[in-house]
Image (cartoon, grey):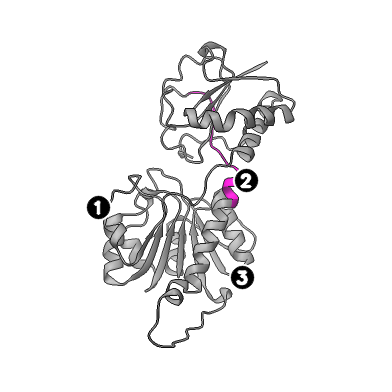
Amino acid sequence: MINIQFSASETAWATYQDTIVAACAAHDLEIDLRQDHAAENVDYIIYAPTSDLQDFAPYTRCKAVLSLWAGVERIVGNSTLTMPLCRMVDPGLTAGMVEWVAGHVLRYHLDLDRSLQTQDLWAPKIPPLAQQRQVSILGLGALGTACATALAALGFSVTGWSRSAKHVEGITSQHGEAGLKSALQNAEILVLLLPDTGATQNILNADRLALLPQGARIINPGRGTLIDDAALLDSLNSGHIAHATLDVFRQEPLPQEHPYWAHPHVTVTPHIAAETRPITASDMLALNIARSESGQPLLHEVDRQLGY
């Protein structure tokens, strides 16, 4: 019997209890899933960073902590968490992110905001074909790669940037500081899909915003900390950046007094770009437990030094 501790909200427990049991059964795992196991008896912890569990030291038998969230910045620095930590890479979440990003890239590409406005004059403006539109994606993890591949399949000229060299079929891959500069200079539409780490905070600052082409558009479904908010507002006010669509923020919910709400060139969405889907996420959790129990490496294990 494999003892699994579920450490997340009561709402999450009601959502995930049955799907985790069913997924584990499908992987031939005999489990005892509870919220109240004695710490010394726990084999795995299914976890959300908002859980009351913050001291992992008593869980001496635990083989891995499996996060329900894609982001692990709230927990990765916990000194008591010495066992492997795995972030959630959920096929359902990935599909949702691809759809959201593709939708907003197409919205900008086709200039739908302008088309939907009431016009006093008949003034047709024909957009270029996708192959003539330069899109850059910062971050080539699972989500960034999936979005880059989907946009390339639609015909867009896609550049992807990552911290270290990566190859993704059908896109131009860049890495390092020189690669970042090139990715920004070519980006008519810029998509941010980086994790929140010390190296990525304020990666889109005033200097880097200035590298973007005049009239560039920005889409951020990644992390709120990736953007220097004051610098972005300055760039929007000057007209250098034409528009920004922002789904994530340093403080959520975004305070009602924040200037983003009233800015005519900002679209705010309430952290809806992608959400973990219980059925597909539960299958990923069960798969990782099955792999661990059979001696295989865990999937999506977090590198503590990199922070993701």
What residue lies at 54% left-to-right and 29% top-to-bottom? 14
* Residue 155 badge: 3
- From the top left corner, tell me how far across and down residue 208 is, in percent: 35, 62
Q: Is residue 45 left or right of residue 116?
A: right
* Few, some or many residues within 10 Å of mark 1 (<14, 14–19, 20+): few
What residue lies at 61% left-to-right and 46% top-to-bottom? 92
- Give the secondary structure at mark 3: loop
- Is 265 placed above or below 56 here? below
Q: Mark yes or no: residue 95 visible.
A: yes
What residue is disc 1 on?
A: 257
- Give the secondary structure at mark 2: helix
- Give the secondary structure at mark 1: loop
- Is 69 placed above or below 240 here? above
Q: Mark 3 or 2 closer to N-term?
A: 2
What residue lies at 45% left-to-right and 38% top-to-bottom? 307
- From the top left corner, tell me how far across and down residue 27 is, in percent: 73, 29
Q: Are marks 1 and 2 in contact (CB under 8 Å)?
A: no
- Give the distance between the C-alpha atoms of the residues marked 3 and 2, in whole angstroms: 23 Å
Q: Quadrant of the N terminus?
A: top right
- Give the distance between the C-alpha atoms of the residues marked 1 and 2, in whole angstroms: 36 Å
Q: Which residues are magenta?
A: 82-95
Identity, as a three-letter code, of the amino acid under mark 2: Pro
Closer-to-camera residue (121/37): 121
Query: Is residue 94 in the magenta section?
Result: yes
Front: mark 1 or 2: 1
Give the tally of numbered discs: 3
What residue is disc 2 on?
A: 91
Identity, as a three-letter code, of the amino acid under mark 1: Glu
